[in-house]
Amino acid sequence: MSFYDPLETRDPEVREADLMARLARQVAHARSGTAYYRQTLAGVEAAACATRAALARLPLTRKRDLIELQKATPPFGGLNALAPGEARRVFASPGPIYELQGGDVDHWRMARVLFAAGFRRGDLIHNCFSYHFTPGAFLMEGGARKLGCAVFPGGVGQTEQQVQAMVDLRPDGYVGTPSFLRIIVDKADEMGADISSLKKALVSGEALPGATRAGLAERGIVVRQCYATADIGAIAYESAAAEGMVVEEDLLVEIVRPGTGDPVPDGEVGEVVVTSFNTDYPLIRFATGDLSAILPGISPCGRTNIRLRGWLGRADQTTKIKGMFVHPEQVAEIARRFPEVARMRLVVDNPDAQDRMVLHCEIGEIPDGLSGKLTECLREQTKLRGSIEIVAPGGLPNDGKVIEDRRVY
């Protein structure tokens, strides 16, 4: 069997209709079941939230704001529909940001991702994500349990013991960070240990360099990667095609211009915004702070959902200039006031050890007085002096950067 279930090969129009119907129900549930959305979605007609355009009008909830939200309304900022005492587990990620594991055995929807990475019922998985404080290991545990796999809870560190367990237990595959798998393989070589039972790996949590993937492939280990967060769970994953990452079936994913909630055209780099259908912890237009872009077409593997290019950096490019914080939202407001400018990028450097701010504006024909108006608006928004540089159409790179810090210290 090549696919986890028939959902993966649905006609895209059928999938979209299903997601839109579920969106209306989830908005109604979030508004009635959580303190946070009861306030932020007040006045929103849930039944009308059944199109992408309606979705784009809903407010963002930014990951970076969770710390303050949780301080104001402990422990989960009022985003939880499940009472804390009814959760399977409660976790703390750096920040701290607290997360819950709800009633579903595969709360983070990892079974589909493990399947795409080659894991099957009856496999033994060596799990080297952390079991301490954070939910990383339990993301995989839930997916493995639903898929019918056994798990060895290796956690992190103790490399020699990890190798010995692999020698003795002969696991079929590994889940964890790619760098730790590389360390384990090197340690096995040093010890003269046979860990050749490892044939597959699902990695996440950090970048997967091409050299690392190739080196592990030479050892007979096929490595796939997934994009997941503690809040959402699985967002997208690699398949055998290894061309981008297929979006998980139970999510609505948008790519928006950093500093705004405005969707960008397919192919343009922007911030990943996710709507989850988890009823215990509903997240509506959750801005992850990560950059990516939608790939055109359908994956050669046969899965028909949209694909992401992968993780392309951070969207929160807030920068301190001359002692003042400048945020992507401020650049976005300038762009809103000047729709004739196709794209903007605020570039900061420090020639002669002095901060300098230049707003690069991509535009064709330049109306009279535009540079002066832009300069005035830049100062109004940032309270700092800066200059304007006009760039020809296509002159700014498509990398999602709104603020670029080129300072050298």
Image (spheres, rainbow, N blue to C red):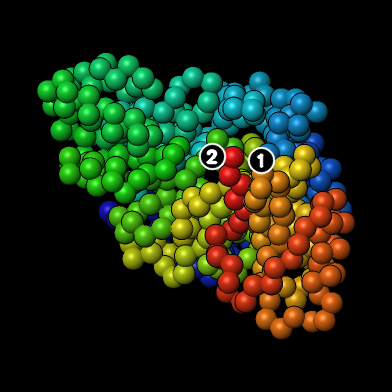
Q: Is residue 54 left or right of residue 145?
A: right
Mark seen at residue 149: none
Q: Is residue 277 left or right of residue 222?
A: right
* Callout 2 amino acid: Thr
Q: Position of residue 9 (x, y in %)?
A: 41, 63
Q: Which residue is mark 1?
A: 63
The answer to which image quadrant residue 76 occupies is: top right
The outermost residue toward the front is: 352
The vertical placement of 350 against 344, above or below, is above
Q: Position of residue 190 (x, y in %)?
A: 17, 23
* Callout 1 amino acid: Lys
Quick one: label 1 or label 2, which is nearer the N terminus? 1
Element assignment for label 1: helix
Q: Position of residue 113 (x, y in %)?
A: 40, 45
Residue 249 seen from this side: no
Residue 217 seen from this side: yes
| Quarter of the image where the C terminus is located | top right
Element assignment for label 2: strand
Q: Residue at x 78, y 54 (%)?
A: 330
In the depicted view, which residue is nearer to us: 5 or 194?
194
Q: Which residue is mark 2?
A: 229
Q: Position of residue 344 (x, y in %)?
A: 68, 64
The vertical placement of 311 against 389, above or below, is above
The vertical placement of 36 against 136, above or below, is below
Give the Cα distance between marks 1 and 2: 10 Å
Q: Are marks 1 and 2 in contact (CB under 8 Å)?
A: yes
